[in-house]
Image (cartoon, rainbow, N blue to C red):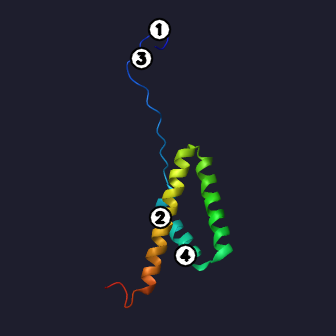
Amino acid sequence: MVDGRMDLLPRRPQCQVIAFPPARRVDRVRRVAENLLRKHGRAADVYWKQTVTRTRNELNSIGAPASAVEFELRAFFDAIQAEMIRQTCDERRPGGDAA
């Protein structure tokens, strides 16, 4: 009941739309994948941690809830992994695009 009136419709939590999710920023995904493929060991770890921190801060600055931040970071990681695999396979394919 609200102000003496019966609340007939259940309240739904507000949704949050992230206009440019990190996993869909193709140029950034490609750049991060290229950099990670070139770096090794500690340098790769440091670069990855900086990338995650920067991305987390961007998502936090727009007010994304913690659950959405974690979801978007995981999707970003998955996109980078897929891009790294794609780039590695492209390098190994002889003769160009026709297989």
Which residue is the site of mark 1? 4
For the residues labelled 4 and 2, the Cα–Cα distance comes to 13 Å
Which residue is the site of mark 3? 7
For the residues labelled 2 and 3, the Cα–Cα distance comes to 43 Å
Residue at the (59%, 46%) spot, across then down: 62
**Could you say which disc has been placed on residue 79 in the image?**
2
For the residues labelled 1 and 4, the Cα–Cα distance comes to 61 Å
Q: Secondary structure at mark 1?
A: loop
Residue 54: x and y in percent read 64, 58
Counting residues from the N terminus, which is met first, the one under dot 1 or under dot 2?
1
Crowding near the residue tagged with mark 1, few <14, some 14–19, many ≥20 C-alpha atoms within 10 Å: few
Residue 32: x and y in percent read 56, 70
Tell me if I can see residue 64 in this picture. no
Residue at the (49%, 68%) spot, across then down: 81
Which residue is the site of mark 4? 34
Crowding near the residue tagged with mark 2, few <14, some 14–19, many ≥20 C-alpha atoms within 10 Å: many
Badge count: 4
Do the CB atoms of the residues marked 4 and 2 lie less than 8 Å apart? Answer: no
Counting residues from the N terminus, which is met first, the one under dot 2 or under dot 3?
3
Q: Nearer the viewer, residue 90 or 43?
A: 43
Query: Label 4 is placed on what type of residue?
Result: Glu
For the residues labelled 4 and 3, the Cα–Cα distance comes to 54 Å
Query: Label 3 is placed on what type of residue?
Result: Asp
Query: Label 2 is placed on what type of residue?
Result: Ala
Q: Secondary structure at mark 2?
A: helix
Counting residues from the N terminus, which is met first, the one under dot 1 or under dot 4?
1
Quadrant position of the C terminus in the picture: bottom left
For the residues labelled 1 and 2, the Cα–Cα distance comes to 51 Å
